[in-house]
Amino acid sequence: MGYIGRREAAPIIVEGLKKLEYRGYDSFGVATISGGIELDKHQGRISNSSRSAAHLKGKIGIGHTRWATHGVPSDTNAHPHMDCSNRIAVVHNGIIENYAELKRQLIARGHIFRSETDTEVVAHLIEEAYEVEKDLLAAVQKIVPKLTGSYALLVIAIGEDRIIAARYASPLVLGVGDGEFFAASDMMPILDHTDRAMYLEDGDIASISEVGVEIFHEGKPVKRPVELIDWSQEDTKKGGFPHYMLKEIYEQPQAFYNSVRAITGETLPAPIRNPGSVTVIACGSSYNAGLIFKYLLEDSCAIPLRLDFASEFKYFPPPIQGLVIGISQSGETADTISALKQAKEHNCTTLAITNVLGSSISRSTDFTLFMRAGPEISVAATKSFIAQLAVLMQIINFIRDGEFEEVLRNGHRAIEEVLLMDLSEAVELCINARSIYYVGRGPFYPVSLEGALKMKEISYIHAEGYAAGELKHGPFALLSKETPVIAICMPGETYAVMISNIKEINARGAPVIALGVEGDLELAEVVDIFIPLPETHPFLQVLTTLVVLQLLAYHTAVALNRDVDKPRNLAKSVTVE
Ligand code: M6R
């Protein structure tokens, strides 16, 4: 968040950051201009901290509340970050993907780095450009083309009565007040002061002074309309979505894209490039992600994978050696952490895959890979699940020497294509169901498990996922017209047997909702409701079917008036065994 105007900036920024905390909360900081730059930053939540940074003096300031991606949560890694001479301060939301290379070059040119963040390279790059340009806007315009990745940047410098803002693939909105201006990742902290906003577009760079805003795109001045925002605070927090879960479902293309790109030759630890065998331990949705990984890894790389519930592994550790991977969105799940400790005691190499930098799991394993889903608020895992798959699929891609590079780089597009599907007919069938069965084969079996988990978790309708061939070994006894079966039936080796399974279900009177590829008339003819999906690579079909099942669970829960984001009896992070 940034402020420029007639009032003291720091108290406004501190209050604003408290409203932005839902986007990240492991550390916070503020910098203001008052002759020199005043800086105050701390590990922890701004809302819990006794040290709030509100005391800083000055009418120009920037602040940040962080969700760590590069460098653990700490005072030093908290934003703002400064250049070597402490004349320039920067806050950043997003990921500078080429920071390692830029950092190497800057260090070679004599720059001293204080933090482990990707963001700090921006401060040093601006420092160099400012030496030449003597103008902050020109300096930012000069360095931005060197950055790869995503950024919403706010920059201040001693001697400059303005804030420079730059945006690419990370949100940034400017609030237009009376003789004062605000900048923030969303309208949430701005609405207390004004309802007039300008949304920057990708590639825009803005110079914000007390008298007005100038915006440039590719060096040329452009105008962005001032819009009236009539959202409530609560609406704004959820980005206009009625629930966090829906917002997070819609954030999945970005979560997938960022997580794929986060796993590079440099970040991938050596033991995982050539594992003899792999064991995965996890709980809940993370377990389902592990099971999808098992199918894809064994098929693509012929590497055997053993999968265990963390809660079982801990008490009944199997006689294994080699690589053990723990998957946990929160990084705090007690069962997964203690199972990994158990694996370490058995001399296994341990790797954590988590969404939370500095989480307990990452401190207890030999290696950690971070996905880049950003904070997930809704109890039901959605974007973190997709991000786990992105990381796991990238591991397969590396083992296969880049065979799936192109597919994964375009995965976010496949997800985007299904976000707006009309599922109302299927929802109508589900809200009246006594039980819902989900069936699939191969990787679509764990997709079925995950679809059923989402449904039961937020709609409270009993739902079970089955390997399609298993239904006839018992569950058939439960089928009736009140027990819809959701069948995932994609082209491939098991297509014909899936069609047979569907006919068997038909014969027992249960309505079938099928997910298949568009234009599949054979399938459409044998089911009650056909949900057509774009035909794409099998990896991406896993993603698209998942997203449809998340949406089906979400809309069913909404139709039943459930507390979608906070389902009864559950917690986001399960820190007890
Ligand atoms: O944080 P983790 O990934 O370790 O959490 C594991 C499960 O508790 C979690 O996936 C849970 O099943 C979700 N609420 C499902 O939506």
Image (cartoon, rainbow, N blue to C red):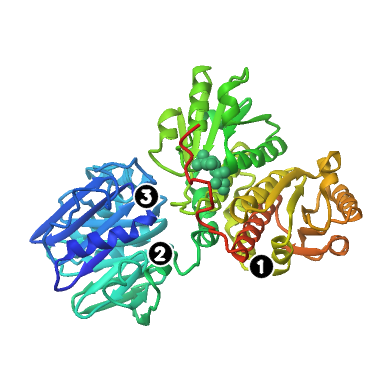
Q: Are marks 3 and 1 in contact (CB under 8 Å)?
A: no
Residue 67, how many percent across, how many down? 37, 49
Ligand 1 within 8 angstroms of badge 3 C-beta: no
Q: Residue furthest right?
A: 507
Position of residue 277 relative to residue 568, above or below, is above
Q: Which mark is residue 421?
A: 1
Position of residue 474 relative to residue 407, above or below, is above
Residue 499, how many percent across, how many down? 87, 53
Q: Which mark is residue 538?
A: none
For the image, the number of numbered tags is 3
SS at circle 3: loop
Q: State the separation of the CA atoms marked 3 and 2.
A: 16 Å
Residue 152, how many percent across, how many down? 35, 62
Q: Amino acid at mark 2?
A: Lys
Q: Which mark is residue 67?
A: 3
Q: Earlier in the sequence, mark 3 or mark 1?
A: 3
Q: Determine whether, in the image, residue 258 is placed left or right of residue 139.
A: right
Q: Determine whether, in the image, residue 197 is placed left or right of residue 479.
A: left
SS at circle 2: helix
Q: Earlier in the sequence, mark 3 or mark 2?
A: 3
Within the image, what quadrant is residue 131 found in? bottom left
Residue 202 visible? The answer is no
Q: Amino acid at mark 1?
A: Met
Ligand 1 within 8 angstroms of badge 2 C-beta: no
- The residue under label 2 is 237
Q: Residue furthest left?
A: 35
